[in-house]
Image (tube, rainbow, N blue to C red):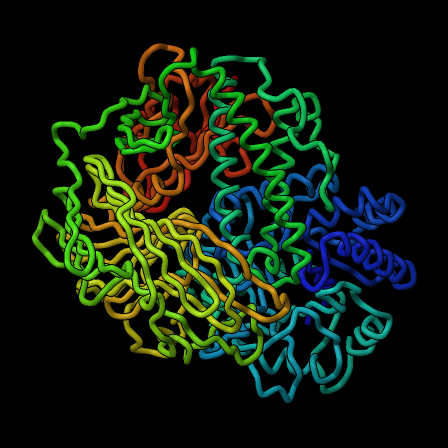
């Protein structure tokens, strides 16, 4: 057994981030003192943000630690800024977690980590292996998969294959008490006789390998190893009847088993945790703000890059828009950012996003004070992002008459928008801008939206879809006029209130028994009215009271689109309940397609096996889709992650009223939008991912006209299913970086069409380091760029 000293430090959980700063100093001081007494003792730590805290708060401890890193007693591994949630955070956020974590380790310790150390995160994205490989990472370690409540994960040493085919090496920590009747293992080992024997007893592939890794030391609240644990290792080194135990490192363990691991079994796809399914929903405001903040900074970086290309040397900011520091803020920046107020502000905003993605903050399993701090952090992020964008737009338009729409997506858009309270048509090229056409009538190739009052509600149609909405806001019928098909088997937009009494952890869990233990609410005393009726847009408004809560909802149908928006505001005052919205679709499908980070995966719509049944609640990113051969329906969201799908019924989980550790969790007003999107063909031909992006990344509107006096496209990816994930100024401030992803799961040849000056273009990894020349396409080849299924590609050019 390789015994690795460590301490699990929850950045926020039953304490605030400010308390973690103190826990960090105390834990590391203890470890360093033990190193002086026991030269053979080795300790590993991973989260860069806590090293950053230590450097600022405890400079003497920091200097002592640096010496132990050089001597090899203090191992630096883990590679990420924090140990983040990997269900809710976006793919781009996971890239930034690794980028900032590894850069910190390299800059301050001259150490290049190889491991993603996530022992306590609540499930793992199916595209994480590719993100790891393209960031130079080789090993994945967890123990949380052993917490499954239904099926035992079959492998402890295995290869993990992601959705693009990338394979990484994975290890499950197996420490548990010898007589344990549960399958839970721990990353906070105590090295007792029982636990040492239990780690070997629990380890599955004994016939193939005789090496096991244990992480020991008090954790969650920090503390780390003790004298007693270290003395046990000295005794267990050669103790008859026990496995041989020795001090070691994570890197040393993987190097030892590497030669014999080539025949290890392979796990394909997501590592779904059969537990803690409520964390896709708890603290819903935090999840919504995380999504908004990720996309706000995406747009801010896009405009900073455009301005850097066409207005070189001009700063967008002259000071931080929010100079007051938050409870954790750092003042240290990489040298290349010191002289750029814009870079410093964006760096600060990203670090706040990454900090709040910690695996007890973003999932919603922390105390209420953590979320008070988090709300302020999101205010800072919003202020910075909006200031950068406003400054950029001011450079890109002129005059104060009319309206210009900006599109940061890499495909053209033609949409009905809201300008000064009235609908208008915007036709904007890919990655560019155009003047908005103010018109009260749709273009010639679009039919106007029509609305008619019926005896029990309203009938709406726009030549693409027709729907009947009842007086209480439920959809009684939805027909696709292009195929003539009725798409609903039962009323949709129905509110289901579930009883929620988890067996163990209130904020963390939803039990399978709760899925059908619901009542339909929002029908009694509901009120509806026609709020707006024009040829471009029809808006119906509803109030749907139940219990102590109230749902206010606008249902919107626009000309030229099959997408139906449900703009929903909920005054949520329930306890021990879950609110879902149901859409029973008349489609025959065995599996649903669900968006995940930088891609998608299929999940069963049946309960054939225990593995299928355990996925009764699932995380999705921006969409879930059910399709037949010629048509389908997608359910889109702008910040709702929990979902369940069985047969043809799909339900979004809107809110959860947990009672611990925050007894006031989610009580209050919540606003978000979800959409029903009927489409022709499968998800790719129907443009599901493009429509979900349009919902989440609305056109940006500003008074004035384009500076060039006409529509302009700065960058375009014309192939459907290929998206621009990032266009940004490089981390070293000397170039531009663009990242594109094949999102639909097929190999394609596409082109990057751009008017940006691509000087000295080359391909990089996700850390913006150039690839070897033989692996990097020449500039001309961007006109014929071949992408593998779910391929993540990053390119850089000089400014």
The front one of 453 and 623 is 453
**Where's residue 784, x and y in %?**
29, 28
Q: Is 471 located above or below residue 698 in the figure?
A: below
Please determine whether, in this image, residue 18 is positioned above or below residue 270. Answer: above
Task: Tell me: 490 left or right of 64.
Answer: left
Answer with the quarter of the image where residue 136 lies: top right
Q: Residue furthest left?
A: 484
Instruction: Look at the picture and state if 290 lies above or below 168.
Output: above
Q: Can residue 624 be seen by looking at this rendering?
A: yes
Q: Identify which residue is drawn at 17% across, 40% down.
A: 449
Observer able to see residue 268: no
Rendering quarter of residue 470:
bottom left
Which image quarter holds the N terminus?
Answer: bottom right
Q: Position of residue 164 (x, y in %)?
A: 37, 50
Left or right: residue 166 versus residue 42 is left
Instruction: Count all numbered tags in the image, as a single digit.
Output: 0
For residue 419, which quarter of the picture? top left
Q: Residue at x 23, y 65 (%)?
A: 491
Residue for point 41% across, 29% down? 700
- Residue 443: image location, x then y, percent: 16, 28
Residue at position x 63%, y 34% from top?
347
């Amino acid at each position: 057994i390789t015994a690795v000293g460590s301490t699990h430090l929850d950045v926020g959980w039953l304490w605030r981030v400010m308390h973690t700063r103190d826990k960090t100093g105390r834990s590391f001081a203890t470890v360093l003192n033990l190193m002086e007494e026991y030269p053979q003792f080795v300790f590993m730590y991973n989260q860069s943000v806590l090293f950053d805290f230590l450097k600022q708060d405890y400079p003497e401890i920091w200097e002592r630690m640096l010496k132990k890193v050089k001597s090899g007693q203090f191992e630096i591994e883990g590679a990420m800024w924090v140990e983040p949630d990997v269900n809710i955070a976006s793919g781009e956020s996971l890239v930034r977690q690794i980028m900032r974590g590894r850069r910190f380790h390299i800059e301050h310790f001259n150490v290049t980590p190889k491991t993603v150390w996530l022992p306590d995160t609540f499930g793992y994205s199916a595209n994480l292996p590719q993100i790891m490989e393209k960031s130079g990472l080789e090993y994945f370690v967890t123990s949380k998969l052993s917490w499954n409540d239904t099926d035992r994960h079959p492998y402890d040493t295995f290869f993990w294959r992601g959705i693009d085919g990338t394979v990484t090496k994975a290890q499950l920590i197996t420490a548990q008490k010898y007589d344990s009747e549960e399958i839970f293992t721990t990353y906070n080992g105590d090295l007792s006789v029982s636990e040492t024997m239990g780690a070997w007893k629990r380890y599955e592939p004994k016939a193939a390998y005789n090496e096991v890794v244990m992480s020991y030391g008090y954790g969650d609240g920090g503390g780390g190893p003790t004298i007693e644990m270290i003395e046990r290792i000295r005794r267990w080194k050669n103790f008859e009847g026990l496995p041989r135990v020795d001090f070691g490192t994570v890197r040393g363990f993987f190097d030892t088993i590497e030669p014999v691991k080539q025949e290890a079994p392979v796990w394909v796809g997501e590592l779904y945790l059969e537990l803690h399914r409520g964390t896709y929903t708890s603290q819903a405001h935090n999840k919504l703000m995380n999504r908004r903040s990720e996309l706000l900074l995406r747009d801010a970086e896009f405009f900073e890059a455009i301005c850097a290309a066409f207005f070189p040397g001009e700063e967008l900011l002259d000071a931080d828009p929010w100079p007051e520091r938050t409870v954790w803020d750092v003042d240290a920046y990489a040298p290349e950012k010191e002289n750029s107020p814009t870079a410093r502000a964006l760096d600060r905003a990203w670090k706040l996003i990454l900090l709040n993605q910690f695996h007890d903050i973003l999932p919603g399993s922390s105390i209420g004070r953590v979320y008070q701090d988090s709300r302020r952090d999101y205010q800072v992020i919003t202020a910075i992002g909006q200031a950068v964008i406003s400054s950029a737009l001011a450079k890109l338009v002129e005059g104060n008459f009319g309206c210009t729409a900006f599109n940061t997506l890499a495909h053209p858009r033609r949409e009905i928008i809201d300008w000064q309270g009235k609908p208008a048509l915007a036709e904007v090229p890919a990655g560019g801008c155009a003047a908005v056409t103010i018109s009260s009538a749709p273009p010639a190739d679009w039919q106007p939206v029509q609305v008619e009052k019926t005896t029990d509600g309203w009938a709406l149609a726009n030549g693409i879809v027709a729907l009947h909405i009842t007086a209480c806001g439920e959809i009684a019928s939805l027909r696709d006029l292009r195929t003539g098909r009725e798409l609903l088997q039962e009323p949709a937009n129905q509110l289901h209130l579930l009883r929620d009494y988890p067996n163990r952890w209130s904020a963390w869990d939803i039990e399978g028994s709760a899925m059908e233990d619901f009542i339909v609410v929002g029908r009694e005393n509901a009120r509806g009215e026609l709020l707006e009726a024009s040829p471009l847009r029809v808006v119906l408004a509803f109030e749907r009271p139940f219990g102590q809560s109230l749902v206010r909802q606008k249902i919107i149908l626009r000309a030229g689109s099959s997408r139906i928006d449900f703009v929903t505001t909920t005054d949520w005052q329930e306890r021990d309940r879950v609110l879902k919205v149901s859409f029973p679709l008349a489609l025959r499908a065995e599996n649903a397609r669900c968006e995940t980070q930088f891609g998608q995966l299929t999940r069963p719509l049946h309960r054939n096996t225990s593995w299928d049944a355990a996925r009764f609640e699932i995380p999705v990113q921006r969409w879930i889709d059910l399709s037949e051969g010629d048509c389908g329906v997608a359910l889109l969201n702008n910040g709702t992650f929990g979902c369940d799908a069985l047969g043809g019924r799909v339900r979004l989980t809107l809110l959860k009223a947990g009672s611990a550790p925050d007894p006031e969790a989610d009580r209050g007003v919540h606003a978000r939008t979800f959409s029903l999107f009927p489409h022709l063909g499968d998800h790719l031909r129907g443009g599901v991912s493009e429509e979900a992006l349009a919902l989440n990344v609305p056109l940006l509107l500003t008074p004035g006209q384009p500076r060039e006096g006409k529509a302009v496209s700065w960058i375009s990816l014309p192939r459907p299913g290929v998206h621009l994930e990032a266009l940004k100024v490089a981390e070293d401030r000397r170039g531009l970086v663009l990242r594109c992803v094949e999102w639909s799961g097929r190999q394609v040849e596409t082109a990057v069409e751009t008017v940006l000056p691509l000087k000295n273009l080359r391909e990089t990894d996700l850390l913006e380091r150039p690839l070897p020349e033989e692996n990097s396409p020449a500039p001309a080849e961007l006109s014929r760029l071949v992408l593998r299924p779910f391929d993540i590609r990053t390119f850089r050019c000089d400014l």
